Amino acid sequence: MITHQRRNADVEIIELKNARASAAVSVYGGHVLSYVPAGGTDALFVSEQSLFESGKAIRGGIPVCWPWFGPHPTDPSLPLHGFVRTLQWAVADERDSADSSEVTLECRSTDATKKIWPHDFRVTLTVSVGTRLVLTLETHNLGNEPFAVADAFHTYFRIGDVTRVAVSGLAGSSYDDRVGEPCVRQQAGDVTIEGETNRIYHSATACDIVDPSLGRSITVSKEAFPETVVWNPWIERAKAMTDFMDDEYRTMICVEAASVGADSFTVKPGATVSQRMTVSVKPT
Ligand code: TA6
């Protein structure tokens, strides 16, 4: 079943529900807010203090960072993580069956987007909800010039206690450490969180978020995303964020499917690039 509701004047929510799972997707931002496998609890975290208003990014769920990740490479006055997470998207298609529900959202270039990024594009996000949550992002170049894109599904996962979680799958990978002086390090063993963490792993391997407090393991796999970003703001940065509660750093971890830095990609005129992230949850 697929139903539409309005949270407020800016934010329309699509609820998808079938025998396998339920989910909620905001048309504003093209943003997945919730994924609950049947009999389980939400795999995604959304801050209780998140704003749901035009011009502000939703804090939690799955923000789409596009067409750049982090600060704009040359103009720091432009928004962090690109601009599609604060655009109104449109519903392009919906499909529903007993075991799977799917919605496709799209956003296109407008005069306003061309003022900050001078390209003609169409981006589609297909959210497929069933035994797994599958997000497919397609970047279409509708213009006459190639353009470069860096992007990410900046996924906030709900966890029981960040100090007890281990992220496996990244051992041996090198990463850019973004806390303190930027440097490159090598991951030894599982990733555990003991302080502010902001790392870009050069690894496309699937990761497991092993969470003994909630008794589950969440697998994140990706196609055409060469990097995995792991982020937790920890105590001081959590306090500094006005749309995030001081103690919420304990119950979230971002494990992001990303294509950034040297792995930004070029889309030729008329071409489409497709990328995918799959999330599955199993009890442990
Ligand atoms: O992915 C990690 C990161 O780039 C951090 O540097 C951090 O600030 C975060 O994303 C959240 O960014 P936002 O713009 O949503 O506050």
Image (tube, rainbow, N blue to C red):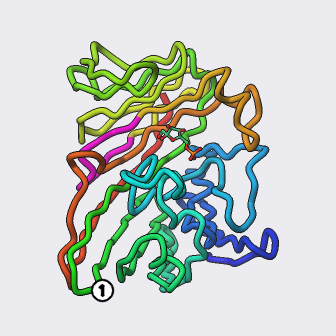
- Left or right, 82 with respect to 161, comes to left
Q: Position of residue 107 (x, y in %)?
A: 48, 79
Residue 182 sits above or below residue 46 on the image: above
The residue shown at (80%, 76%) is 9
- Left or right, 14 with respect to 97, comes to right
- Left or right, 228 with respect to 13, comes to left
Q: Is residue 224 magenta?
A: yes
The residue shown at (50%, 75%) is 103
The residue stretch that appears in magenta: 220-229
Residue that carries the numbered disc 1 in the rendered image: 142
**Quarter of the view holding residue 141:** bottom left
Image quarter of the N terminus: bottom right
Asked whether 218 or 230 is in front, the reply is 230
- Left or right, 251 with respect to 180, comes to right
State the predominant SS element of the stretch in magenta. Answer: strand
The residue shown at (45%, 26%) is 210
The residue shown at (56%, 27%) is 215
Q: Position of residue 202 (x, y in %)?
A: 24, 35
Other-residue count near label 1 (Cα within 10 Å), few / some / many at <14 / 14–19 / ≥20:
some
Name the kind of residue labelled 1 in the image: Leu
Q: Is residue 39 magenta?
A: no
Asked whether 228 or 163 is in front, the reply is 228
Asked whether 265 or 164 is in front, the reply is 265
